[in-house]
Image: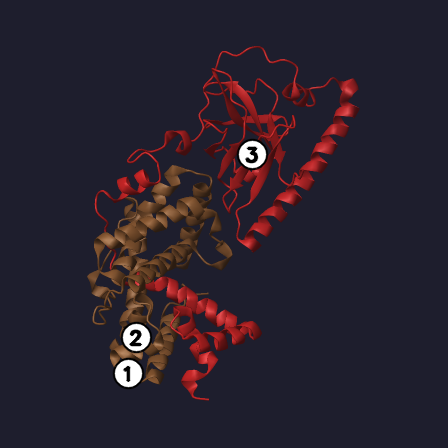
Chain colours: A brown, B red
């Protein structure tokens, strides 16, 4: 899996380099590769497919216009895209004043076996699916309370004190559950985290 | 201090962005002082990046890509052949090449014996500069690894034109994209073409379609890894490209060139 992620990283660096050089074909490949993943992130923040499409579209426009700002020394392109999508979705959620649904955290059940389309390449789709499954499997090993606090922090952009207020958990408990949950994920995903 | 308020215990929350301002300041103070804290944060940030994969993928509507590319002013639903396709220059009926930069380069490698000494000196010079270029290329690649940018090579005008160019290599040096900018308008029936050079060997590269400000970009596909070529040049050629250059370079460059 580590070899696969390294190959993906190289492929992504090639794509972003070509996109910076205004290669439309590279942008199309990137869109094909990540659109459904980014849609998943945006949808789990704002629960509207139409709004999620607008946000993900904004992200790809930003890649086309500002791709040169991507700094590979700070992380991989996939993480950059996912974090940008998450941040923009949370900004929208805050500005719109939409009510946060704390029961809808949205972590995939590992048995759902979701395999996204990746540019019509079955091998890559399968590998991407395995990568997602590995993360989903790690998430499934957390307690429900740990999954809940991580989901509210990650997808709803809530602070620890907001999570405590929303769930009725003591603030110290929220902090501890986030720390232990992230620590367990880090250990479970040690082949992907360096 | 309550364990849950110890900045060391809040690094995971910091990676998720769920701390209040006071806690954020405390963690940032720790990060400024502690290498191990920075390492721990880097790992939690990687975990945070991966969390986006733990939710179901959602397919956008069928019109998503058309709307996106329309918004970008790009033609929807078509592969941009001018950029995406590798170069395949076709043979052209061209005028007899005049004694030129290319002729001189070729002559260097086909001199009579009485000129061998001079030729040998030039070969040594080329090998020497080749060695330096290799060193520069390695340094350029190493710097790229350090600062995370892709290796690049600059192309300079040989006639003090405003024209300029660049080749952006993939991190492994195999592929790349050539960009030229502020080029003079090509005469009717002509376009600019890239050349890849090793010693006297000159391999044809892609031709460029320029916009109204003289900008064009092409993906470069070559027989050898792109970073194995010593020099690159751009010439004006008959439309469709040539198998050998027919005019002197308007742009040229090598790894490590500086102006």
Q: Position of residue B224 (x, y in %)?
A: 52, 35
Output the chain of dot 1. A
Q: Are marks 2 and 3 in contact (CB under 8 Å)?
A: no
Find numbered disc 3 in the image and state the secondary structure of the residue it sits on: strand
Q: Identify the residue shown where x is 44% and y is 74%.
A: B21
* Residue A169: mark in rendering: 1
Category of crowding for the residue at label 2, using alpha-carbon neighbours closer than 10 angstroms: few (below 14), some (14–19), many (at least 20): many
How far is disc 2 from disc 3 in space, using C-alphas? Answer: 51 Å
- For disc 2, the marked residue is A149
Kindly tell me whether residue A126 is visible in this rendering: no
Relative to residue B249, is residue B204 drawn left or right?
A: left
Find numbered disc 1 in the image and state the secondary structure of the residue it sits on: loop
Q: Position of residue B30 (x, y in %)?
A: 53, 76
Measured along the vertical axis of the image, is residue B146 above or below residue B244? below
Quadrant assignment for the N terminus of chain A = bottom left
Q: Are marks 1 and 2 in contact (CB under 8 Å)?
A: yes
Measured along the vertical axis of the image, is residue B103 above or below residue A111? above
Q: Are marks 1 and 3 in contact (CB under 8 Å)?
A: no
How far is disc 1 from disc 2 in space, using C-alphas? Answer: 10 Å
Q: Identify the residue shown where x is 46% and y is 33%.
A: B218
Output the chain of dot 3. B
Please identify, in this view, whether the residue under mark 1 or under mark 2 is nearer the observer: 1
Q: Position of residue A140 (x, y in %)?
A: 27, 71
Relative depth, front residue between A188 and A33: A33
- For disc 3, the marked residue is B165
Question: Which one is earlier in the sequence, the residue at label 1 or at label 2?
Answer: 2
Please identify, in this view, whether the residue under mark 1 or under mark 3 is nearer the observer: 1
Output the chain of dot 2. A
Relative depth, front residue between B49 and B224: B49
Category of crowding for the residue at label 3, using alpha-carbon neighbours closer than 10 angstroms: few (below 14), some (14–19), many (at least 20): many
Total numbered labels placed on residues in the image? 3
């Amino acid at each position: 899996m580590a070899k696969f992620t390294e190959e993906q990283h190289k492929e992504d660096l090639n794509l972003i380099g070509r996109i910076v050089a205004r290669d439309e074909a590279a942008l199309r490949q990137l869109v094909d590769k990540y659109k459904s993943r980014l849609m998943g992130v945006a949808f789990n923040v704002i629960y509207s497919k139409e709004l999620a499409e607008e946000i993900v579209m904004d992200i790809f426009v930003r890649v086309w216009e500002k791709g040169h700002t991507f700094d590979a020394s700070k992380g991989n392109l996939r993480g950059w895209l996912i974090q940008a999508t998450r941040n923009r979705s949370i900004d929208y959620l805050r500005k719109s004043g939409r009510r946060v649904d704390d029961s809808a955290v949205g972590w995939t059940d590992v048995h759902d076996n979701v395999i996204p389309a990746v540019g019509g390449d079955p091998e890559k789709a399968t590998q991407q699916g395995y990568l997602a499954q590995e993360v989903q499997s790690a998430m499934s090993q957390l307690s429900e309370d740990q999954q809940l606090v991580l989901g509210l922090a990650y997808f709803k952009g809530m602070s620890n004190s907001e999570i405590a207020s929303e769930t009725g958990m003591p603030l110290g408990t929220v902090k501890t559950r986030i720390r232990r949950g992230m620590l367990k994920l880090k250990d479970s995903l040690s082949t992907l985290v360096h | 201090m309550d364990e849950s308020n110890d900045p060391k215990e809040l690094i995971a929350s910091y990676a998720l962005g769920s701390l209040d301002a006071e806690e954020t300041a405390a963690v940032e103070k720790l990060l400024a002082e502690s290498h191990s804290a920075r390492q721990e944060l880097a790992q939690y940030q990687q975990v945070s990046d991966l969390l986006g994969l733990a939710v179901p993928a959602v397919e956008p509507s069928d019109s998503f890509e058309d709307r996106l590319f329309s918004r970008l002013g790009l033609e929807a639903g078509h592969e941009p052949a001018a950029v995406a396709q590798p170069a395949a220059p076709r043979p052209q009926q061209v005028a007899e090449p005049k004694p030129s930069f290319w002729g001189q380069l070729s002559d260097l490698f086909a001199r009579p014996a009485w000129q061998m000494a001079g030729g040998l000196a030039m070969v040594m010079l080329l090998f020497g500069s080749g060695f330096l270029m290799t060193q520069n290329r390695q340094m350029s690649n190493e710097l790229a690894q350090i600062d995370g940018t892709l290796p690049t090579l600059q192309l300079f005008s040989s006639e003090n034109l405003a024209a300029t160019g660049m080749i952006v290599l993939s991190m492994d040096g195999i592929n790349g994209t050539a960009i030229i900018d502020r080029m003079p308008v090509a005469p009717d029936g002509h376009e600019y073409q890239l050349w890849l050079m090793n010693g006297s060997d000159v391999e044809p590269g892609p031709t460029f379609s320029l916009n109204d400000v003289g900008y064009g970009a092409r993906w470069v596909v070559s027989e050898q890894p792109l970073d194995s070529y010593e020099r690159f040049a751009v010439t004006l050629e008959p439309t469709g490209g040539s198998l050998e250059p027919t005019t002197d370079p308007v742009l040229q460059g090598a790894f490590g060139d500086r102006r």
